[in-house]
């Protein structure tokens, strides 16, 4: 698929430049794209696949932030790459991922010379900041059942009416226990909002 189809906001001049300076790379399912403490060498434009981003705590606990999918870029990588700062997140390929890697030494030039790239970075950062505010709001002000409902809603919106995921994976993402998540899922199922089977959750009235 051509870059223009995935990033329709880019004009031909910018696309030609990105293809000239970028490198096509691929990650296998389960492969780590970034770990906490590493320096960004590239900013990735996701061409296909799904990447999961986490924040890691001091004791090794992980908290799910958001997904990157086709047509997305990581706002944090753009900012940290430009400032040559270490990553504060972990990124893992949830499926096979194809991406265009833009070396960090081109970031300043892109921001200065290509207005469409400048707007793209700002919009990427704005949309992710808004999403993170929603996550923070859920963490601070809502109960676990509300957090679970919010989490499932995001999954359904992204993946459709049926998602393949284990109770333990949900518990890890929400910093909870598998037993609590299983109990809450059964409650939602009893309300006929979802249907739960082995490693699969189907949206009914959600």
Image (spheres, grey):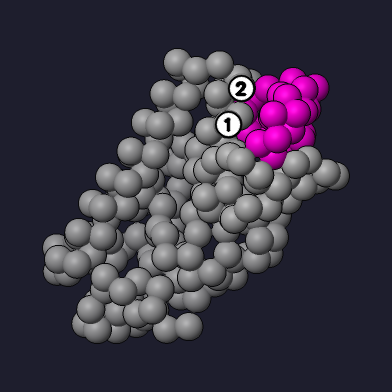
Q: Position of residue 11 (x, y in %)?
A: 23, 78
Q: Classify mark 1: helix, strand or loop.
A: helix
Q: Which residue is more in the foreground, 75 or 104?
A: 75
- Residue 52 appears in the rendering: no
In the image, which disc is placed on residue 89?
none
The majority secondary structure of the magenta stretch comes to helix
Chain part drawn in magenta = 165-194
Q: Residue at x 63, y 53 (%)?
A: 161
In the image, which disc is placed on residue 149?
1
- Are circles 2 and 1 on residues that touch, CB within 8 Å? yes
Q: Residue at x 53, y 33 (%)?
A: 150
Q: Classify mark 2: helix, strand or loop.
A: helix
Crowd class of label 2 (few under 14; some 14 to 19; many from 20; radius 10 Å):
some
Q: Residue at x 35, y 71 (%)?
A: 7
Q: Which residue is more in the foreground, 64 or 16?
A: 64
- Give the left or right position of residue 90, taking residue 101 as reference: right
Q: Is residue 50 above or below residue 63?
A: below
- Residue 203 appears in the rendering: yes
Q: Where is residue 143 in the image (x, y as percent from the top left)?
A: 56, 16
Q: In this view, does 31 lie above or below 136?
A: below
Q: Which residue is more in the foreground, 158 or 90?
A: 158
User: Can residue 179 be found in the magenta stretch?
Assistant: yes
The residue that label 2 is drawn on is 145
Gap between marks 2 and 1, in whole Å? 6 Å
Q: Position of residue 83 (x, y in %)?
A: 29, 46
User: Can residue 144 be found in the magenta stretch?
Assistant: no
Indicate the quadrant containing the C terminus: top left, top right, bottom left or bottom right: top right
Q: Which residue is more in the foreground, 102 or 38?
A: 102
Crowd class of label 1 (few under 14; some 14 to 19; many from 20; radius 10 Å):
some
């Amino acid at each position: 698929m051509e870059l223009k189809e995935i990033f329709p906001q880019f004009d031909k001049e910018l696309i030609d430049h990105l293809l000239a300076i970028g490198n096509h790379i691929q990650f296998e399912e389960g492969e780590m794209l970034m770990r906490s403490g590493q320096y960004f060498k590239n900013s990735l434009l996701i061409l296909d696949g799904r990447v999961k981003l986490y924040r890691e705590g001091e004791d090794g606990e992980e908290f799910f932030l958001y997904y990157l999918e086709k047509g997305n870029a990581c706002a944090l990588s753009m900012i940290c790459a430009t400032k040559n700062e270490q990553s504060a997140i972990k990124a893992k390929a949830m499926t096979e991922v194809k991406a265009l890697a833009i070396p960090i030494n081109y970031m300043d030039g892109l921001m200065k010379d290509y207005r469409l790239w400048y707007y793209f970075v700002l919009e990427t950062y704005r949309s992710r900041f808004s999403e993170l505010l929603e996550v923070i709001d859920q963490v601070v002000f809502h109960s676990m059942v509300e957090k679970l409902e919010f989490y499932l809603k995001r999954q359904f919106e992204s993946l459709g009416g049926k998602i393949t995921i284990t109770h333990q994976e949900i518990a890890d993402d929400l910093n909870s226990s598998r037993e609590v998540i299983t109990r809450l899922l059964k409650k939602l199922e009893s309300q006929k909002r979802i249907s739960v089977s082995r490693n699969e959750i189907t949206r009914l009235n959600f």
